[in-house]
Amino acid sequence: MEQVPVTAADGTTFVVRVLPNDDPAVPVALVLPAMALKAKFYLPLLTALRAAGLSAAACDLRGQGESAPLLGDGPDFGYKELIETDLPAVVAAVRERFPQAPLFLFGHSLGGQLALLFAAANPDAVDGVAVIGTGTVFWRAFGPRRWFEALWSIQWIGLVAAVRGSWPGGVLIPGAMAGGVMTDWARHSRTSRYRFRGRSLDYDAALRALTAPVLTIALDRDLLGPKSNVDFLGRRMPAARLTAWDVDEDSGVVHRDHFEWVKDSAVLAPAVAHWVRTGSLPS
C-alpha cells in the first residue's frame, strides 16, 4: 500500500493510503470515513474495490488517525475546514497520483455528507459520489417513533460539545470529535439545512444543483442512517443522476448495520465498482 502525504492550506497534514490498480487509467475510489473512525477501518473495502477492478484510496478526517495535529492539539474546527480546506488538498493529491483516472468519492456516514457537499461546491473536481449509511440527521427524517430520541440525543451531543469545546465519545458516536463538527452536525439535525459556521456558499442550493452521478446505499439494519434519512437526503439532490440501492436480506450482504457492513466488502465493492463503470447497479 502506498502512502501519499498531503498538506492542507492551513498546515494540517494527512496521509492518503493508496491501493493502485495495475492500469493507471481505471477509476479511483477515495474513501472518506465516518465520525471517529480511522481510515484503516476501511482496509477490507479498499482491498475489495481493487479486486473489483478499481484503484482505491482512503484518508483520515482532520483530527483522526494519521492526520496532524491530533484532536485537542490544534484549534477547533467544523464542517467548513473539512470541506473547504481539507478535501480540496486531499482530492488534488489523489488527482495528481492518478492523472488519467476518473475520481469517485465513497463516503461513509459523515464522510458521505462531506463527499456530497464537496462535490456540490466543486462540480468539476470529482466524477461521482457513492455513499453508504449516509442520510440527513434531521430529526423529523427519522420515523415518528424515533423523533424524540433523535432530537434529544443529537442536541444533547451538540450542547455538550459547545460547552466543553469537544465531544468525548459515547452516545451514538464511537469516539472523540471536534466541538465545531458536532455543533454543526446538531444544527443540521435541528433545521435539516447545511448552514454550518463560516461556510462560503449556500450548500443547500449547491446540493439542489448537483448533477453528478450519486449512489446512495441504505442498509436495512442501520439505526443511525436508516432508509428514511437516506431517501430524505436523496430528495435534496433533484438534479443528480441518483441511483438508490436498498440493501436487505436478499442482497447477499449479511452484516447490514451502520458499521459492520465493512465485513461484507467483498459483496458490496463489486456492485459499487459496476456502478462506477456503468452508472447502474448489476442486474
Image: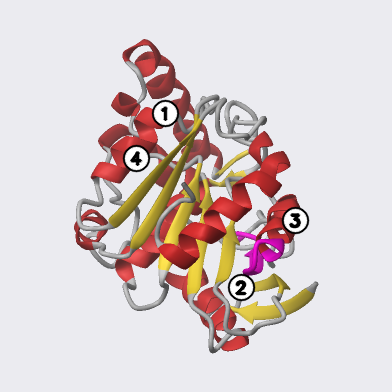
Q: Which amino acid does label 1 sit on?
A: Gln
Coloring basis for residues: secondary structure
Q: Which of marks 4 and 2 is nearer the N terminus?
A: 2
Residue 137 visible to an observer of this rendering: no
- Left or right of 196? Residue 14 is right
Q: Which of marks 4 and 3 is nearer the N terminus?
A: 3
How far apart marks 2 and 3 lie (CA) works out to: 23 Å
Q: In the rendered view, would you say 15 is above or below 228?
A: below
- What residue appears at the point 45 percent right and 32 percent down from the top-left corner? 159
How far apart marks 4 and 3 lie (CA) works out to: 32 Å
Q: Which of marks 3 and 1 is nearer the N terminus?
A: 3
Q: Quadrant of the N terminus?
A: bottom right
Question: In this rendering, which labeled residue sits more in front, label 2 or label 3?
Answer: 3
Q: Where is residue 84? Give x, y as percent.
A: 41, 69
The numbered disc on residue 43 is 3
How far apart marks 2 and 1 lie (CA) works out to: 29 Å
Question: In this rendering, which labeled residue sits more in front, label 4 or label 3?
Answer: 3
Reading the image, the residue beneath label 1 is 155
Q: Give the range drawn in magenta.
A: 50-62
Q: Where is residue 116? Give x, y as percent.
A: 39, 57
Label 2 element class:
loop
